[in-house]
Amino acid sequence: MPKNSKVTQREHSSEHVTESVADLLAHEEPVDYKRSVLNVTGETWNKQKDGEEDLEAENRPAWNSKLQYILAQIGYSVGLGNVWRFPYLCQKNGGGAYLVPYLVLLIIIGLPLFFLELAVGQRIRRGSIGVWNYICPRLGGIGYASCLVCFFVGLYYNVIIGWSIFYFFKSFQYPLPWSECPIVKNGSVAVVETECERSSATTYFWYRETLDISNSISESGGLNWKMTLCLLVAWSLVGLAMIKGIQSSGKVEHAHGCSRISTAAFPCSSGSPGMSCGATKPPNFFLCLPSKLDKMLDPQVWREAATQVFFALGLGFGGVIAFSSYNKQDNNCHFDATLVSFINFFTSVLATLVVFAVLGFKANIMNEKCVVENAEKILGYLNTNVLSHDLIPPHVNFSHLTAKDYNEMYRVIMTVKEGHFKELGLDACLLEDELNKSVQGTGLAFIAFTEAMTHFPASPFWSVMFFLMLINLGLGSMIGTMSGITTPIIDTFKVRKEVFTVGCCIFAFVVGLIFVQRSGNYFVTMFDDYSATLPLTVVVILENIAVAWIYGTKKFMQELTEMLGFRPYQFYYYTWKYVSPICMAVLMTASIIQLGVNPPGYSAWIREEAAEKFLFYPTWAMAILISLIILASLPLPLVFILRQFHLVSDGSNALSVTYKKGRMMKDISNLEDNDETRFILSKVPSETPSPMPTHRSYLGPGSNSPMEMSNAPNGRYGSGYLLASTPESEL
């Protein structure tokens, strides 16, 4: 032992020398405590079990390459919301002006919290359950809540993939089946289907041919066998990708990450009709629309931007933590967080440009159709002398009537026939009105886009490519969502990966049959609106508090310095400790207020009216809705109570000093400072160690203390010390 050690000083001096566990053990040779006299826990050494734990730590799956990991994270974070939610919010909330609050919130909320999840997953190398048990056992319910939310989201998200699969296979025919209304025979007379004639061909195909939807959520209508088969195919694809773990799903995610970049840019680079036809008009609507700067002062805009940032990055689901847990500990997760966050943002902007290009093309077509139909009405009125030929400007040519000429003629007729204008039934046919029809979600993908594609040359090709893109987007996000369930469960309960994955997919398929009955679309809306938003907001707030306030921001920053090899910016210190928790609390409050101000409801398709109608949820549906929120949040208080009152053991009374193959872990969480000294001096500190942890004061990131340089949480209360390439936690 070195001559300058405190133990040597104590042996050659009569003075009292204080020796800490860390100081003493820093000079010891590595041994296995269970096979030595340092085994003070009283537990029996199980050679086989101990070997299995070492083997598991050393054999944890890992990504084949950094590129595979980055593309997997991109594949998970870039999902359907980037295609059909972000563009809608841009159009609704001021065009380009909406990018300002979104980018601000991405920087002060999205990036710091995304970095936090990547860092804890990589540092502790466990799924969400193990990570939060490791950091703060009393908040271990965070991991279980994340798993439940992932399960709820996965249930309905895979249904959307099933819908995309149905449209994908229907696209291999010309003309596309939703391009025209079906003809039905009424006796000897062939007539157009009434529901289709009163709406549109694409709307009819979606609601009647695809969903065969009922008039309300209360009318079940039985299973839709076509959608049931598509759902089975979707779960089979997810199960096959997940069953081999990241060695299999990583390759799938790799392909999905590449496809997100290529398919998002595909309509722009291939000269699609949406981009070329109206390149100087409607497609530039997003860029040319005057930004409504006053929208930035609207709190609702900021709330919607925060919610979009929150879900776009997949915060709180556990998928981010699961993916990062397979990284090496020296991986630069700060670079990963920045790269993925901004790729996600730019992909959303690119998708918005493409969406507006397609919608602009559709608006042009619909506007031309409106002009032709109303011009025919005006000709009829001229031939019947309802209107005078003097009202028509001399330069107007009905055989080549432009939108500008029609608008001029429309204004003249409206001025002259002011008293009887409504009786004429003429429409203004303004391009801006068509463009301002806000559409999002399934309405954008399965109605607006499909209608636009019917006007494209080689429309089946564009339809196949579009729905292939949706399937890729959906599967990538589903694999990340399922990883948020399988990784923590397998890590914690040591179940067989293949058996659990197959069982989980089968169970999810059976439960998901509720979404493929005729009223299933209404349940999809319910789960999408209410099963995740509030519980996930609470989960992320508690994640932030657990790291920043319970574990300690300074301590966490120091560990990141050791792990990354450089000190993260002070920006993260203040955002983790103050900015992000406050912003998330405001978002949660706003969501609760929004829920109270606007009673929950859904848009129902009424067959007799061939139109949508907003309906409120019946009492039993409200009970299901509330149960979803409560069930997803229940693990948080439940685990806290069980561990706070020691109804479930979390090992708080265990004292162990462990050496393993050159790695050292010390679990001394229940020793007081004085007890620690007396333990080393072979004095009895007390009859019973304190069951509560003592969190030692941290001297700050500038400290040169060797003990603090190895400071890391243990598997109980985060007050132990670790020198290891792989954290060891008793979960």
Image (cartoon, grey):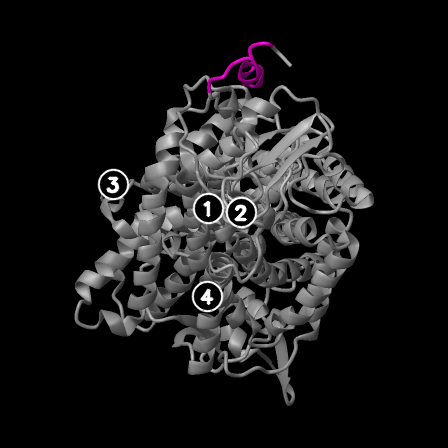
Of discs 4 and 1, which sits in the foreground? 1
Per the rendered image, the range of residues in magenta is: 3-15
Q: Earlier in the sequence, mark 3 or mark 1?
A: 3
Q: Is residue 236 visible?
A: yes
| Residue farthest along the right direction in this orientation | 48
**Crowd around label 1: few <14 · some 14–19 · many ≥20 (10 Å):** many
Pointer 2 and pointer 4: residues touching (CB < 8 Å)?
A: no
Residue 203 location (% of width, % of height) = 52, 67
Q: Earlier in the sequence, mark 3 or mark 2?
A: 2
Residue at which label 1 appears? 543
Q: Nearer the viewer, residue 19 or 12?
A: 12
Asked if labels 1 and 4 touch by Cβ distance under 8 angstroms, the answer is no
Q: In this rendering, is residue 144 above or below 722?
A: below
Magenta-colored stretch includes residue 44: no
Return the residue at label 2. 132
Q: CA distance from mark 1 to mark 2?
A: 8 Å
